[in-house]
Image (cartoon, rainbow, N blue to C red):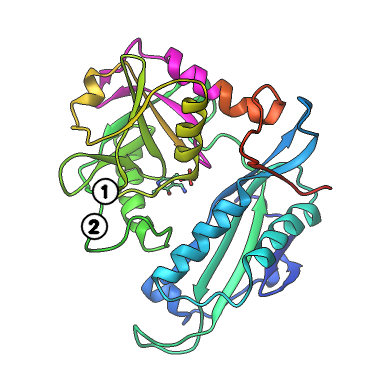
Amino acid sequence: MPTYPDWIWHNGTIKPWADATTHVMAHALHYGSSVFEGIRAYETSSGGQGTGTAIFRLTDHIRRLFGSARIYEIDIPYSPEDIEAACAEVLRRNGLVRGYLRPVAFRGLGGFGLSAETPTDVAVAAWAMGTYLGAGALEDGIDACVSSWQRVAPNTIPAGAKAAGNYLSGQLIAREARRLGFGEGIALASTGLLSEGAGENLFLAIDGALHTPPASAALLNGITRDTIKTLARDAGIPVVERDLPREYLYLCDEVFMCGTAAEITPIRSVDGHQVGQGKAGPLTRRLQALFFGLFDGTTPDRHGWLERIDG
Ligand code: PMP
């Protein structure tokens, strides 16, 4: 059993964790009508960027939350600023100087039809979170496999919405990978080309440049993916968004996955084929240093990504 934090924000108020309940007949529970975000707060230090807790790209995450809600016509009865304030408050109330934030908005109890006009429940939880893909994953990398499950086709379910229903696909991919002894699964799009990990975007290093599948490859347009593209371009590292066939995973110099939870996780093998030297390669290390440098002040926060909660 995990240990739960004391407080949670639910429908406008901070309340004890155990009190944030919903009805078993809530629409979202039956039909997946829920949108959410995953956000990290980091403890930052020095470098002229200030110290204390910063929520990483909070505004961008909350904009994506409202975008996901718009796609599904889920009406969030709060402003983006209300949800941002709730994120800060729930960290503070739980005494968390770093951690993971989970805003969620879902169709609650109010009708059983697919297109029922239900009230929207909104919650923001925060908890302590370490490395997502296992101890040592950031340093040593993980072994990944290409999933036998494909990502949704573009005209079926929009991969660009961060909606609960999409994570049925993610669960199939992640659970199959773990069952077969791999650290994470990589999905192909319905085109047969590379898409993304179960809950992470994908980068390949080829001859000193970073290559990543385009938004058309049925993927979530990750905020970490965007951060990496920007940090790389700022550092003069070429970034190419392009269609990538599966075999490039075996031929390229480096592969890494990225996401809010996974941060930047090196992939040391795919389907049992060693990638590069079978450990985190130089470009992966460089991007990790630039990314984590944002929090210890060694990378300047040129784009205003560190959103402080403590004044
Ligand atoms: N793809 C999927 C399917 C995800 O669930 C996530 C995690 N939110 C990502 C990519 C990475 O997105 P982000 O960097 O915004 O966390």
Coordinates of residue 258 in the picture (x, y in percent): 45, 35
Say whether residue 248 is magenta.
no
Residue found at the very far left of the displayed protein: 191
Coordinates of residue 223 in the picture (x, y in percent): 49, 44
* 236 is higher (above) or lower (below) than 87: above
Coordinates of residue 27 in the picture (x, y in percent): 44, 79
* 240 is higher (above) or lower (below) than 54: above
Left or right, 242 with reference to 160? left
Q: Where does label 1 land, which residue?
A: 216
Residue found at the very far right of the displayed protein: 311
Residue 204 can be seen, yes or no? yes
Q: Where does label 2 land, which residue?
A: 154
Magenta span covers which residues? 259-288
Mark 1: few/some/many CA within 10 Å (<14, 14-19, 20+): some
Q: Which mark is residue 151?
A: none
Which residue is located at x 77 percent, y 53 percent?
A: 94
Question: Do tag 1 and tag 2 residues touch (Cβ < 8 Å)?
Answer: yes
